[in-house]
Amino acid sequence: MKKMLLPLGLLFIIGLWSYVQKDRSKPVTQPNILFAIMDDVTYKHMGAYGCDWVNTPNFDRIAAEGILFNNAYTPNAKCAPSRSNILTGRNSWQLEEAANHWSYFPTKFKTFAEVLDEHDYHVGYTGKGWAPGKAKNKDGSARNLLVNNYSQIKTTPPTPQISNVDYAANFKAFLDDNREGEPFFFWYGGLEPHRGYAYGSGIAKGGKSLVELKDEEIFGFWPVKDSVKTDLLDYAFEIEYFDKQLGKMIAELEARGELDNTIVVVTADNGMPFPRVKGQEYEYSNHLPLAICWGNGISTKGRKIDDFISFIDFAPTFLELAGIKEKDSGMQPITGSSFTDILSSEEPNMVDSKRNHVLIGKERHDVGRPDDQGYPIRGIVQENFLYLKNFEPVRWPAGNPETGYLNTDGSPTKTVCINSIYKESTFDYWAWSFGKRPAEELYNIKEDPDCLNNLAFSGQFEKVKEKLKKSLFKKLKDQGDPRMFGNGAVFDHYQYADQSGADFYSRYMKGEKLKAGWVNESDFQDIRKVKTYKEANP
């Protein structure tokens, strides 16, 4: 019998042959994959990145026993489109309806999870998978983009606002069902720290105190107030809950002797659910935590990597690790590129100098503007700069004031920022989160990660801006972005899948009693009565 010869690089990546003295025709041992994704976390708020008021020992362990990525970005800072990017390996502007939040997922786009299932992987998820939106097969039947849902086992969470899904118990049930001993892919989709929170739970339940959160750790676009700090500690408490469930899953893998052959990936879908972060396209919106460990495949542990990783890179990486060629997957062409070379490398810092940028952008997230319009943005992060092109600067970036700024979740911090409009001394806090923006923005994110000093109209940075804009637009044209070909309005015309909220602006303004469950009634603001309103529209 002939030997199966594999490229040296693939041997390096996937691991050891199943060495059998009399028969070496057995396939390479395929690794398991545990993909753990938090719901709304900015990268800075994990212990491994230096945060001391959020305790994440299990994330930190993954980083210490594997790799911590310093530059991981989602292309789109909202739940459903970000998860679409992960599952397809394509940017939002390449996904038709799935570029939007609460969309109908196009049948033409196959997910890597469905491919793994077809290639003898045991596939499942718990908690939040691809959501919110609706996915159907061509025959109209329900389609699960992550194949099998394991969310039946419940628990009593520490607060009513935390999900009652027992993530770890459902993971154990998933493993128990794998009677054939197939390699597995499991998506741990925590619903934390998504809104809402039990106000004060970080202090009452998490043992935290306001003094441990220093004033300088409050981002510059929020006022330093006890209510904001309390909100942040509640956010921290829910991150810690997610991390504890992750620890239970790691312990389960260890008990079964599966941890070394399991690639554990821990990240989030978009930035924290606070004003000017989630749903926007700034540094804290898109820059996310990412740690990966793999006992059998990462030999040099504890490395910190500066290569830029986009969420569209996960799909090709997982396919390669599973030994599946893209041409055999049946997926639409993948835009992302595998980063298995980083996993197998022994180098810290920068492994591939070509991984020096990421593209970001958005279309319609939540409704609340006339005709269900979105707020289209495209951007690029490169060489310590973030360049943004706002295609419709006449629109409200977080949604219209009179319909509650629906693209920002209701929260104590949002309330403080909304009310900041009434005083000259605090007006900027409202403007930074809710005011209209110019057509172009440029920030030095190394010196100004809060993205408060717009350099786009400074002559000193004109060359930087034009260089980034030219590069961005060329890449977008190469990827077939409708915005580059005069057809960007197509994204506004895709149907909003949540019919209870569709055409929200028009219905609300006509007097229909509508409630958006993710914002507070006090978020609805008639800014025509605000004396300083003109300052938002110079």
Image (spheres, grey):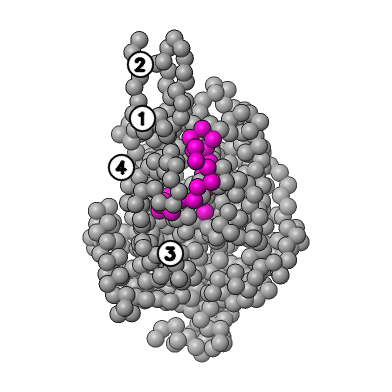
Mark 3 closeness class: few <14, some 14–19, many ≥20 residues within 10 Å: many
Mark 4 closeness class: few <14, some 14–19, many ≥20 residues within 10 Å: few
Q: Which residue is mark 2?
A: 3
Between label 3 and label 1, give the one nearer the viewer.
1
Magenta-colored stretch includes residue 291? yes
Query: Label 4 vs label 3: CA separation?
Result: 25 Å
Tell me the element at label 3.
loop
Say which amino acid is labelled 1.
Leu
Of pointers 1 and 2, the one earlier in the residue sequence = 2
Between label 3 and label 2, give the one nearer the viewer.
2
Q: In this rendering, would 480 be left or right of 285? A: left
Between label 4 and label 1, give the one nearer the viewer.
1
Query: Label 4 vs label 1: CA separation?
Result: 26 Å
The answer to which image quadrant residue 470 occupies is: bottom left
Query: Label 1 vs label 2: CA separation?
Result: 14 Å
Of pointers 4 and 2, the one earlier in the residue sequence = 2
Question: Residue 281: which disc?
Answer: 3
Of pointers 3 and 2, the one earlier in the residue sequence = 2
Say which amino acid is labelled 3.
Glu
Q: Which residue is mark 4?
A: 333
Magenta-colored stretch includes residue 182? no
Say which amino acid is labelled 4.
Pro
Of pointers 4 and 1, the one earlier in the residue sequence = 1
Q: Which residue is mark 1?
A: 8
The residue range painted magenta reads 289-312
Asked if residue 78 is positioned above or below residue 141 in the image, the reply reads below
Where is residue 534 shown, x and y percent of the image?
44, 87
Number of numbered tags placed on the structure image: 4
Say which amino acid is labelled 2.
Lys
Query: Label 4 vs label 2: CA separation?
Result: 32 Å
Closer to us: 163 or 329: 329
Q: Is residue 166 visible?
A: yes
